[in-house]
Image: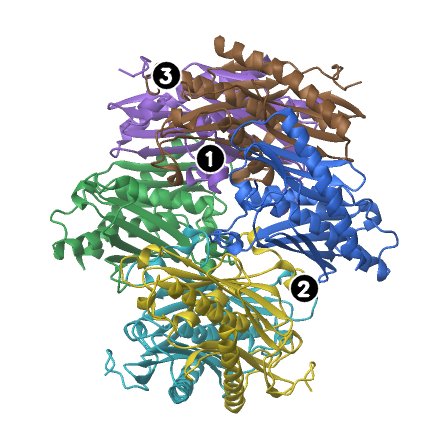
Chain colours: A yellow, B blue, C cyan, D brown, E green, F purple
Amino acid sequence: MRPSDRAPDQLRAVTLETGVNRYAEGSCLVGFGHTKVLVTASVEESLPGWLRGKGQGWVTAEYGMLPRATHTRGRREAASGKQSGRTQEIQRLIGRSMRAVVDLKALGERQVVLDCDVIQADGGTRTAAITGAWVAMASAFAYLRAEGVIKADPIMDQVAAVSCGVFADTPVLDLDYEEDSSAEADSNFVLTGSGQIVEIQATGEKRGFTRSEFDRLFQLAETGCAQLFALQRAALAR
Amino acid sequence: MRPSDRAPDQLRAVTLETGVNRYAEGSCLVGFGHTKVLVTASVEESLPGWLRGKGQGWVTAEYGMLPRATHTRGRREAASGKQSGRTQEIQRLIGRSMRAVVDLKALGERQVVLDCDVIQADGGTRTAAITGAWVAMASAFAYLRAEGVIKADPIMDQVAAVSCGVFADTPVLDLDYEEDSSAEADSNFVLTGSGQIVEIQATGEKRGFTRSEFDRLFQLAETGCAQLFALQRAALAR
Amino acid sequence: MRPSDRAPDQLRAVTLETGVNRYAEGSCLVGFGHTKVLVTASVEESLPGWLRGKGQGWVTAEYGMLPRATHTRGRREAASGKQSGRTQEIQRLIGRSMRAVVDLKALGERQVVLDCDVIQADGGTRTAAITGAWVAMASAFAYLRAEGVIKADPIMDQVAAVSCGVFADTPVLDLDYEEDSSAEADSNFVLTGSGQIVEIQATGEKRGFTRSEFDRLFQLAETGCAQLFALQRAALAR
Amino acid sequence: MRPSDRAPDQLRAVTLETGVNRYAEGSCLVGFGHTKVLVTASVEESLPGWLRGKGQGWVTAEYGMLPRATHTRGRREAASGKQSGRTQEIQRLIGRSMRAVVDLKALGERQVVLDCDVIQADGGTRTAAITGAWVAMASAFAYLRAEGVIKADPIMDQVAAVSCGVFADTPVLDLDYEEDSSAEADSNFVLTGSGQIVEIQATGEKRGFTRSEFDRLFQLAETGCAQLFALQRAALAR
Amino acid sequence: MRPSDRAPDQLRAVTLETGVNRYAEGSCLVGFGHTKVLVTASVEESLPGWLRGKGQGWVTAEYGMLPRATHTRGRREAASGKQSGRTQEIQRLIGRSMRAVVDLKALGERQVVLDCDVIQADGGTRTAAITGAWVAMASAFAYLRAEGVIKADPIMDQVAAVSCGVFADTPVLDLDYEEDSSAEADSNFVLTGSGQIVEIQATGEKRGFTRSEFDRLFQLAETGCAQLFALQRAALAR
Amino acid sequence: MRPSDRAPDQLRAVTLETGVNRYAEGSCLVGFGHTKVLVTASVEESLPGWLRGKGQGWVTAEYGMLPRATHTRGRREAASGKQSGRTQEIQRLIGRSMRAVVDLKALGERQVVLDCDVIQADGGTRTAAITGAWVAMASAFAYLRAEGVIKADPIMDQVAAVSCGVFADTPVLDLDYEEDSSAEADSNFVLTGSGQIVEIQATGEKRGFTRSEFDRLFQLAETGCAQLFALQRAALAR
């Protein structure tokens, strides 16, 4: 049995609240159970130097965790003077995932920065961040269209992410921290609304895992993402 | 008239919500109008090296601002690799303010870290942080006493803070961002429940200001803090 | 057709040369075609603080690229003052991959550091590094056993890695730089000698990719790693 | 009684020597008793990017302390790789204080950098620095006018600073290090020649302090600054 | 007797292999006994800002040591976040030495960066780097002339370097690590093919040394460099 | 003719003033013409970790330049966040020079830090720093002996330094900034009172230089140092 009494293929309660920041062009507070991530989408009318004059825009992400988001306080990255390898790995993943479903030409020569700040962490912060970042980004694009800044919607597809893992030798969906810290294998799947793969990261934590275990994780991810896509659409419709 | 239509001696709507973080020993989400600061109090059973073995504890603070807390996105300090002078100045002020009302011997050889993260900024983030940090800290001490970790309450007095300024040649209480950015003078007062001064910072921004203007700012601060003390007590009583 | 005229399931010429550093306990110069990575295994009789006294050892990796390993000169990370996110991501991956096949208790309270320095880069540096790091590490363990420092071999299994991708809509094995820079999808598989998965990273670069494409990439990886395992054993046998 | 046998309202011997650096456009070696600060004013015909093309100049300050300015050697900030929060706080204060009395339009599109380096520290380094920086800056402006670079004097008023504190329950003027390290309250006042307030910083160090104590500190500061203004004028007249 | 059984005026076996990097405009793997340094010469069609538009080019060098180049593993400078004083001293020396024999006007407005990476270190890495850097640079210039990028050869003279020292009270040529670590005096001579001095660095390590010892070291260096010049010419001729 | 009208073998006016810092165990303000360096010797009863428990002490140096020591303002190293290669090269040289004449065993398990801060720079700051550092260090040892902290004087010999160069094709002693910036060759000699060489650094700046030019520079340095030794003894005798 899972510590949370969930069925193996059961997501935690997922919430997606838009309009939570007064200043950002788009924003979303995403909750996967006790994991809470605040995402803001900031539209900037400038581009990094290497992209200027190419007739296209850019989407990038930054990720951070408040020091006491976790069970014990972690060091503030601004105080230690650098972002950890884990932070950089996650923010690169979020950026790639968003760009996979955005038509950068339709965006025009501007940049969208997705700031994903973890308010509370109970496992799955990167997948929650991706799922919420898409909502914040879509809100920002809706705002840009309403303002007449862009004509066509640069969004080509939905994208969402979920973690799966092998816990107590059983493949399960959407690991919480307790499961994550003792799982045999851990994976993150980033999938599109049309069923394509954007990214798979799968790691044997305690032992290697088998091809058939991996196939079951994949199946769980598809099930979970289908629910997340519906929740994303509902959040934007509100 | 003030942009917000407030009377010169009128605070913004102030909210102090405790118990907002599942893991921290104490926490408080403080709002001064649109300014929102999340404060967590983390109790650590260790001390910085220079304080070990002296039979007393320590209280310190860290301050940060989410990149899109403000009207336009600011650079993430963890990404730029250092905390700005402003950040360091503010976190030193918060720490001093808390230590002014704590009996460090009664705390014992442990440290309380107050993380003050600005979720949304509309002026007065440092005074909101101080006002909320006291509530988070008091909650943490209540928890430590309930757990039997400490016997006596280390809190000796309340402490709260408010900004005042000269706006359009009129002394006013609790500046919002619009007022702050065009004020002739700006000040922050940190006062104790028993009416003592912990810290005064007053700066002529556009011009020097006079002794009589300063005296009026001081009076406004006393009025404002009296209301904040009542709100702090109410927040803890809930 | 592939730019290198290889068949879709054909590895580049792979070389694994041991004993290339006079001082290191183990070393391996690994070549995947024009990609050359020098790996040294350094055994240190000390552990990071958080691991001391736990009756086990540690294996970690560092990764670097000489500035002119690539077509155009890149900035020296020591001069820019920090390691890129990409560098950190890769060295974390190498470390996890090695630890997946090492019995850390059998290693005893000592650390093995695997330095993977890219002398020349033509795609697939991380997979070459993993494949060569295993050889360097195994050489170091053989040395430690010969010296009587450890009794049992801490190696539990082989581990190797290879990249696969979708190039010109065709799944192919072991991408070189030219293929990598225009591939639709890119993936890295880290597998063990006994057929288990240590890590999968798969990314849609130009478009999402399908489940059936992914399954073909997986199959190619299994084919490629089987050859790498044989080459690793041969290198150690020399 | 005060350790230095001074009366409560008595400044230390204050010296202001101009022309102490062969290359700087203006310079002043300021002494408040054993505290010695070397200030140079450097005029640069360029501006920080955010100020260019706005038809005005800028005045800024940097502050440093030689490692052995103090009783025990402190760490060199250039070696530790960053300026402390205290350093940044002080240099921001000096810059604000100077800008409060300078007509930046009259200065034209150029920048004055005031480098304040503490040669020996016996308390009150920031107030000595401000008092001397005004003299160095005024010297530089006199030089620019003599050279015909600027027409009108950008100086609108004098500015000076002094510390006051509550020592052994008595308000006293111009704390030295011995007083400062055991004072109940510490404050810095930055005032203009025409009697206006530029900045007040007041902190309860050992306990909060009262409104009437604060009023007495203010009065002492006004007395002290009156003497400093006369000394500044005399220094320039020489 | 020397630990390596060499005569006092005997160089180690010196090798200079060109064309060792597939991408660089020039390259040289230089060996002085067990010391191995890989040098690449990268030609960039851009200049540092302070040199632009002056009708001349620039030659600069960077130096690094692989962590396990040495008997015990050293810390990776990219990981520690800065280059040591020793590294900076050496790369400044290499750059000065190359510029001493290059006609920067003939080079045109482009930059040559010489990356000197120590693969294995047994003493004398800086002198090996200089000797090899000249070969890599000359190869790059030959390439530029063959491509028609430049007309005249910017090389005005050869330059090579060798260390000498007082070991066991005897002046000897080309110290290896064992000699270097117990030498009484250590020196590096950088000389030109036409017999001029580019740089001398001589240090008493255990004791001061005398004028006559110095004169003997100088003589040994002249002998050694004569052999190095012949080897450089032979390497380029191949 | 030299710009300063000095004879080729003539030093600038050299001053060595001791007792210039109230807190340091030893101090010296050294002037070589307009070059002014403030040296303090700080005695610390602790050692760097790698030297503890070896029955000997340590002498080290740090070097800095005030931003406006020079004709145009330079960047403050504490603000830029790192010490330049030049700074590190110089402070390593000063430390080596002092250790060459100190009996570290006689010093006992304590460290002397020589802070050399350039107040005004007109060429030759490193040689002035070495010459003054020996005086500050000797003063500190005299103090330690007077206090009974050490018995024997750890000083074994005098050490001083002077620059020489080839200016307008003439070898001259003690270059000032104007000469230094257009010299054909530049050298620094660090010699002991008993006539031994501690360090020689000689560089061809505009062209290589010849053996006979070098011999003449050496001779000038011996002449100059002889005068500096006499001035050092006189400074200590006062």
- The residue beneath circle 3 is D145
Residue A49 location, quadrant: bottom left
Tell me: B71 left or right of A76.
left
Q: Is residue E56 left or right of residue E12?
A: left
Residue under pointer 1: F76
Between C113 and B221, the one lying in front of the other is B221
Q: Nearer the viewer, residue E60 or F1?
A: E60
- Which residue lies under the disc numbered 2? C52
Q: The residue tagged with tag 3: helix, strand or loop?
A: helix
Q: Nearer the viewer, residue A81 or E223?
A: A81
The chain holding disc 3 is D
Q: CA distance from mark 1 to mark 3?
A: 28 Å
In whole angstroms, how far apart are the C-alphas of marks 2 and 3? 68 Å
Asked if the residue at tag 3 contacts the one at tag 1, i.e. Cβ–Cβ closer than 8 Å, the answer is no
Q: Does E221 sit above or below residue C134?
A: above
Q: Which one is in front in this view, the residue at disc 2 or the one at disc 3?
A: 3
Q: Amino acid at mark 3?
A: Arg
Q: Quadrant of the C terminus of chain F?
A: top right
Q: Tell me residue E45's x, y (percent).
A: 23, 51
- Which element is circle 1 on? loop
Vertical position of residue C113 compared to residue E107: above or below: below
Residue B133 shows up from this direction? yes
| D158 shown above or below A158 | above
Mark 1 Cα shell of 10 Å, populated few (<14), some (14-19), many (≥20): many
